[in-house]
Amino acid sequence: MLGALAWQITSSKARFIKPHPLLWMGTVVAFSAYHYNQHYNSGVGWLYELDALISMVMRICMLNICFSSGYRLLNIHSPAVSYLVNASLFIYLVHHPLTLVYGLYVSPAIPKNYLGFFAGLVMVFSVSFILYEIHQRIPVLRFLFSGKSNNK
């Protein structure tokens, strides 16, 4: 909701898309405090209250990082960004079932968690992009998934 308001009220949009180094440093400090609270707090006293407070501060700081970085990176006019923007909806729709298939059939055969995570990333994203390219070349699929006709 805050993002929608920021794009409707231009003064707040200018405030959100300008990177603030103090908020970026605040994110690092808040993440460090969050990590410390999760791993080294004994679980008595103010654990959950501190967790809620630290998480709130970290979210507020991360808001500036996400808005300013996203605004800067997504407003670059390049073929790669255009390709990713056009592919984003299709890949979003396709990666969910691919992740489930990976988790059910491939992941149990991989003994290491890190290896399984990175193998899953590579498999899901590569198959998603391959399916996107196939969908671009078949007119019926192109129309069903993106609503675009064959005429470009």
Image: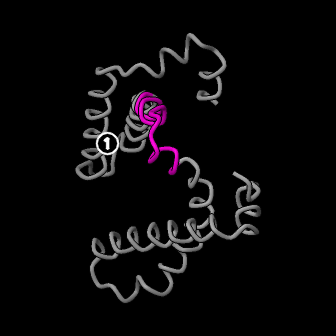
Q: How many marks?
A: 1
Residues 117 and 34: in front is: 117
- Left or right: residue 49 versus residue 27 is right
Amino acid found under the numbered disc labelled 1: Tyr
Give percent across and percent down for residue 88. 56, 53
**Which residues, given as a range, are shown in magenta?**
68-84
Quarter the N terminus occupies: top right
* Above/below status of 139 relative to 86: below
Quadrant of residue 136 in the image?
A: bottom right
Point 44% across, 70% down: residue? 126
Q: Please, what is the dominant secondary structure of the magenta stretch?
A: helix
* Above/below status of 7 relative to 103: above
Point 49% across, 73% down: residue? 127
Point 59% across, 73% down: residue? 97
Q: Is residue 79 located in the magenta-colored stretch of the structure?
A: yes
* Above/below status of 19 relative to 98: above
Quadrant of residue 59 in the image?
A: top left
- Left or right: residue 75 versus residue 20 is right
For mark 1, does the 10 Å Cα neighbourhood hold few (<14), some (14 to 19), or many (20 or more) residues? some
Give percent across and percent down for residue 34. 31, 42
The residue to which callout 1 is attached is 34
Q: Is residue 6 located in the magenta-colored stretch of the structure?
A: no
Point 36% across, 39% down: residue? 46
Give percent across and percent down for residue 15. 48, 15
Residues 4 and 86: in front is: 86
Residues 35 and 60: in front is: 60
- Left or right: residue 133 versus residue 150 is left
